[in-house]
Image (cartoon, coloured by chain):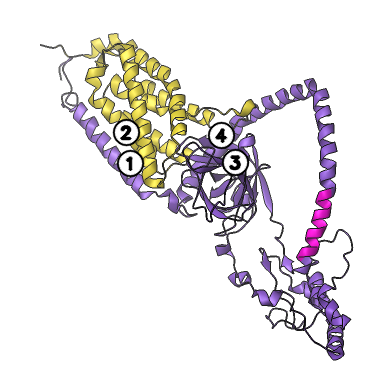
Amino acid sequence: MRTPINKNMRRGLAGKIIGPHEWIGIPALLAMAATLIMATNIPLPWGLVLPEPVWPLALAFSWPLIRPSYIAPFVLAALGLFLDFFWGAPLGFYVLLLMIVFSITFLIRSYIVGQDMTIVAGVYVMSLIGFFILGTLLTTLYAGQVPRLLGVAEQMFASLITVPVMWWLLDKYLHADVRFQ
Amino acid sequence: MPYGEKSSFEAIKVPLTWGVMVIVAGLCIIGVLLFLGDRRSDMTEASYGNRAGFDAAAGPANNLLSTPAHWVGGIAGWFDDYLFAVSENRRLRKEVADLTQYKNSFLQAKELNRRYETLLQLRTDPEVAMVTARSVSVSRGPFNNTRLINAGREDGVKFGHPVINEQGLIGRVVGTGGQVSRVLSVTDVVSRVPVVISRTDARAIMAGDGGGYPRLEFVRGKDAVKKGDQVLTSGDGGIFPRGLLVGEVVPSVDGVWRINLYTNRGPIDMVKVLKYDDFSNLPDYTILSTPPVTDVLPPPPAPAQGQAAGQGASSAASSSVAAPVAAPATARPTATRLTTPPATPPAQPATRAAPQATAPRPAQAQTQAQPQAAPVTPAPPPQAPAAPADGD
């Protein structure tokens, strides 16, 4: 018979309890801030421009692996809406893309959690590729024109910068709270 | 309730996994509905209204972020100028020497052009008011190419205004807030700009695809395009004025013509918003009606006219001296078009009259065009059309 976690046990675990504001709220705010900073128009020498990675993609992949949550999908949808507004995309474009990544990762989370980090990173890169393929299809659908595929590859390459972010999130929060198991 | 037992709330078995999946499915459906309901190709001023508040908040935030970067850039530029002042000075001296000869040629061509415009009674483009702004934020991904500038409705910026910089065309305003506007770049996937090939006058459409080299589509005419041709806006459709610099034609590896935008030459920082209103927004669209060419061109000289005809022409010419007094009042600063010759007396300046059969039209034309084109030097009165009649 399993022992219910009573108040005494909770008091003992209090130092390890991770609230949603820690693994959902703060990373979401950081992703928004990073998006804002990367979009700043800073003239760089030699015609260089700042990269434009899709920061919330790391959250869409990490959150369902950390633990099932009712809050995370709503926050992720809000982040998608933020990208739609901020980057001038049609409403729902990034909401849909991020939610699809979230849902697929959520469905296969039991196969990913516990794997070696290299394999997890590989799966993340695959989800990143799927994200941009789907984005290309949706753009072709509404614009009637295929976006420049080299540009898609460039942004996909720039978004690889989010791999360490995903790594850090999983390393910090995946086993941080016993309630997450 | 005994200590250590579950509360009634904790006893509720919530199927967390299924609950999350239901939420995710619901959010996906909402995303699909939002996406289907927002067609950017049909973007209008009204459809942007729900985004103006967001941009009003994001614009100042990005402006705040870019300010220290510009400070650092300015300091770096100062050091750069100091270290390379000698070589820069040499380069500029050579450039000034090269450009001096072009300046003289330009002044000659400008004066010649002014005379031609006077002869043809061509009404040139009026000066378009501009607003200078700074690009504070940019989205440069393959799916969206827009930027925020720190000038908005309070500065007179309206939906549809073209945006340029010192290099060429950047895009057009698709949304305005109080002090911030969103500019749709010509490289965006939904951007379509009517253009003209400068060398052949062939019309085409520049279609953005998210990259720096938009496609050239629907090129009209055979062999109308070759590498290096200059591309300008054609003015068709009325969104952009005619003649804005766009770029040069280059062949691409996928077998289509593309345009190497002039704005690719450097970073886009300061921009100018042209307060150029769409033709469809003109309060009086009748000013766009162009008179027939026969009304504008000088009439052919009569083949065999006697002295009486010559006298008649001379008297008509002398009587037309009074016309210039009222002619400037009929001149209205509008878009490029040919003017209606004011053959009627000054009391009826707006009516279109039948073409005059006599010679003094060039004299009228010159006077009428004066408010538009300030003379560099006093132009001699064009007498060429009247000469045959007087000579008889």
What's the distance in space between the residues labelled 2 and 4, CA to CA? 27 Å
Residue flagged by tag 1: what amino acid is it? Gly
Q: Do residues under tags 4 and 1 come within 8 Å of each other at their CB atoms?
A: no
| Chain B rendering hue | purple
Q: Earlier in the sequence, mark 4 or mark 3?
A: 4
Q: Do residues under tags 2 and 4 come within 8 Å of each other at their CB atoms?
A: no
Q: Do residues under tags 2 and 1 come within 8 Å of each other at their CB atoms?
A: yes
Q: Secondary structure at mark 4?
A: helix
Q: Quadrant of the N terminus of chain B?
A: top left
The circle on residue B31 is 1
Residue identifier under label 4: B61
Residue flagged by tag 4: what amino acid is it? Ala
Q: Residue at x 66, y 74 (%)?
A: B293
Q: Where residue B313 sits: x, y (%)? A: 83, 84
User: In the image, which residues are magenta?
Assistant: B105-117
- B269 left or right of B2 in image: right
Q: Nearer the viewer, residue A44 or B123?
A: B123
